[in-house]
Image: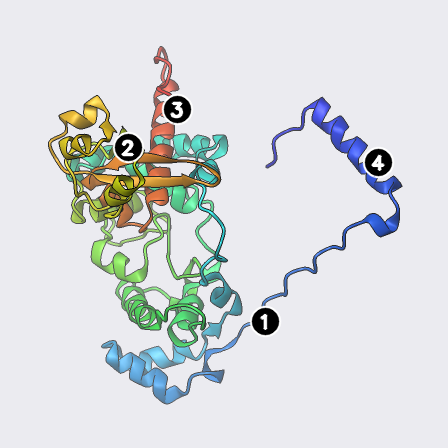
Amino acid sequence: MYPRLSLALGAALALSVLLFTMAPAQAARPRKPPPPKDAPPYPLTDKVPAAELARFAIDAGLDAAEVLPVLTQAQIQPSVQRLVMPPPAGKAKDWSAYRALFIEPQRIGAGVEFWNANAAALAKAENDYGVPPEIVVGVIGVETFYGRIMGRYRVLDALATLAFAFPTGRSDRSAFFRTELGEFFKLAKREGADPLGYLGSYAGAMGLAQFMPGSWNRHAIDFDGDGHIDLIGSPADAIGSVAHYLSEYGWQRGMMTHYSVALPADTATRARLLTPDVVPSFTARELQAAGARPSEAAMDFDGKVAVVELQNGAKAASHVLGTSNFYVVTRYNHSSYYAMAVIELGRAVANAWKAQAPGAAAPAP
């Protein structure tokens, strides 16, 4: 939803519309043509012969007699081919704009509702795996808006498109998606589910936690004890699986995710400190010796940190010192911007959740 316009801004917009309608027609700028519509889906078998599909099934360790009848119903989705392409080059990254997509009132409110409904599972996940509730809540909030946006593509179609009709113009990842398609068939068979019934993202990620099939098979757990792993309909399974995933990638109980820092002005030194990106490579004292100014809390931290840069478009970049727990969050999505959005959304939801209690102190900024 758009915020309400103030009376002054509304009046200014009305005046601008009036002036535009009074201007000569030749002064109007030509409108850009609408973007071309995606071509309609078409059967996978129009592009891939049955013999190749049979080889895929055998190579994946699947029963071709079971898999081929399903694959013959898969559709190549041109919109998936478009969406998997990288964004246009030349547009500057903007952390402040990216942050605003996720740390906003509606998502925070939905996060509080999710926390209220699943407080026991969140507490159990922290007890079992050491991952704080706000991190799990942050992941699920960024990934799917707490289940409101879980994807509209048939997973079979998305994976088959990227496995057998990966678009040209970027590095070919069809091998990865063929592996994921094989994992998807294994998942559906194990759960006794119809492969045609799963919906997910354009890349084939599924459920509240948006696990790819391979991650589902390796890291998802039955956290509600009903004998099935359901990341789509069971918030408890999703919560436990996110915590388990982060734990398996090295989450350390009680460790901060990041600290504040001011970098030195010297461009060569800054470049050297930023080169490792999200990989913890320096102690705070090493950074201080290089001219950086870590926070007091960072100076008390005895582990290594990464100097993480978050660009803000034309404005000055922001910087933080990411610990190994920050690095673990980037294993969920290999982006420092993603990790900071998860952390800050989780913190905002936690503050709002605590503030709803009777007599609660004002939330932290």
Nearer to the camera, 42 or 342 = 342
Q: Residue 106: percent from the left, percent from the top?
A: 49, 33
Q: Around disc 4, counting alpha carbons within 10 Å, would you say few (fewer than 14), some (14 to 19), or many (20 or more)?
A: few
Closer to the eye: label 4 or 2: 2
Element at label 3: helix
- Rounded to the nearest angstrom, the CA distance separating label 2 from label 3 is 36 Å
| 83 to 168, vertically: above or below | above
Q: Which residue is mark 4?
A: 18
Q: Position of residue 352 (x, y in %)?
A: 39, 24
Whether residue 264 sits left or right of residue 167 in the image: it is left
Which residue is more in the foreground, 1 or 260? 260
Q: Mark 3 touching mark 4, by CB under 8 A?
A: no
From the image, tell me which residue sits under label 1.
Answer: 39
The residue identified by callout 3 is 352
The amino acid type found where label 2 is placed reads: Pro
Q: Earlier in the sequence, mark 3 or mark 4?
A: 4
Q: Say which element carries label 1.
A: loop
**From mark 4 to mark 1, how far is it between C-alphas?**
39 Å
Q: Residues within 10 Å of mark 1 (few under 14, many from 20)?
A: few
Task: Give whichever of discs 2 and 3 has the lower sequence position.
Answer: 2
- Residue 84 disc label: none
Tag 2 residue: 264
Q: CA distance from mark 3 to mark 4?
A: 43 Å
Q: Residue at x 34, y 78 (%)?
A: 67
Per the model, the C-alpha gap separating discs 4 and 2 is: 51 Å
